[in-house]
Amino acid sequence: MKKKLVAVAVASAFALPVVAQAQTANVTLYGRANLDFEFVKGRQPDGSNPSVNRVSSNSSRFGLRGTEALGGGLNAIFQLESGVPWDAGGGTLAGRDSFVGLQGGWGAFKLGRFHGPYDDIHAIFGDTPTYLSSILATSALWSNSAASATVLQGAFDDRYSNSVRYDTPNIAGFNGAVQYSTIENAGKGYHINTAAYYNNGPLKLGVGWVHNDKVRCYATPTATTFATCGTIGSQFAAKDDAMSVAAAWNFGFLQLSGVWERLDYDTPTGNLKRDFWGVSGTVPTGPAGRFYAFYGKAEDGKGGASDAQRVNAVAHGADTGAEMWELSYTYDLSKRTSVYAGYVQINNEARNNASFNINPYPVANGAKPEGYVLGLVHNF
């Protein structure tokens, strides 16, 4: 109730008619402050060890969401969510998942900008105690998201603008989703992102598939915007695919999880493929604490491409793999406030330079970056 009253008060600051409408809708103001202190070491292959101490904001956000009953079991839904860098200030309005849609017994339909269904695979095996964020995020190697790569650079776990999405209702633990996204200014490029899940009792299962057609900058792989890619045309010829499967079983004293992924990229000299697998375990320590451990291995790149080909942190040939492992502990001070601590390390082979996904730290090929984390999360 307090959140609803605050949301109405915020709306009144902009226009009185908004208050009148909010009185007939279920509107919630919400957010998360997730900050940590990090000590990161670069551990470069030349023997140098550059290090940094920093305070980082990890997927902190501020948003407004709501529903309106339209009758007959049909609801209008909306969400406007913005990233808030609590450590340095600033932020972008609607930079995170933001949409409007309809929801009923048949499922939910949304239009806007948001993560694809593939992203939910991460929650099955990832470090959920720390909200899948900070340098502890286990998506550093999975989905080729190292160094916060964008879809334009070949990452698959990203937000998609100009999206249409349908989510099925939950039927006996089964549900699925499919999302289509257009690239309005990139030569008719598009994404198809789909996944299916089972969550019932101690078992969780998930399988996801993504197809990106004429999305990645073919000629300028380091481009971060379509403007820097160049003239629309052959630069966007790539057709890229990702498939991932994850499973988890909760024994009560231990939740054991596993994941496998295959990435398949187009390159000028042929396909570039890479496999990834990982295992994780979560051990509760009483009603409020839990230990988490993870190990992941990215195999060498393979396929018909030449050894000169690279897509972000995926390269072709020998010595292009990497491994990642971490340990963390989380303790809930209340239902909304938690503290956590952890250690993470990425071991790159001689021709790979993978870094952390959240809060990346630049490294050279063959580097072995590591970091220590002490964090605090408050949800409101």
Image: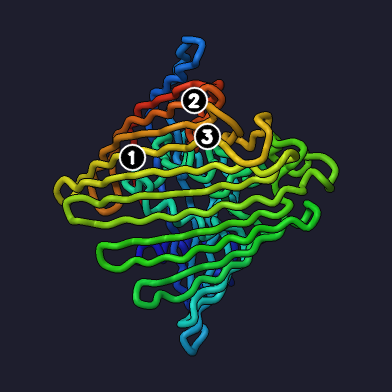
**Observer-nearest of 266 and 108:** 266
Instruction: State yes or no: discs 2 and 3 in contact (Cβ < 8 Å).
Output: yes
Between marks 1 and 3, how big is the CA–CA gap? 20 Å
Task: Look at 46% across and 68% down and name the residue there.
Answer: 27
Between marks 2 and 3, how big is the CA–CA gap? 9 Å
Residue 331 in the image: state x and y as whole percent.
Answer: 23, 43
Task: Look at 34% across and 61% down and name the residue there.
Answer: 204
Query: The disc labelled 2 sits on which kind of residue?
Result: Glu
Query: The disc labelled 3 sits on which kind of residue?
Result: Asp
Q: Name the residue under label 1.
A: 294
Q: Quarter-wise, where is residue 187 in the image?
A: bottom right
Q: Mark 3 points at which residue?
A: 300
Is tag 2's residue or tag 3's residue first in the polypeptide sequence? 3
In which quadrant of the rendered image does the N terminus lie?
bottom left
Residue 40 in the image: state x and y as whole percent.
Answer: 42, 23
- Residue farthest to the bottom? 72
- Residue farthest to the top? 47
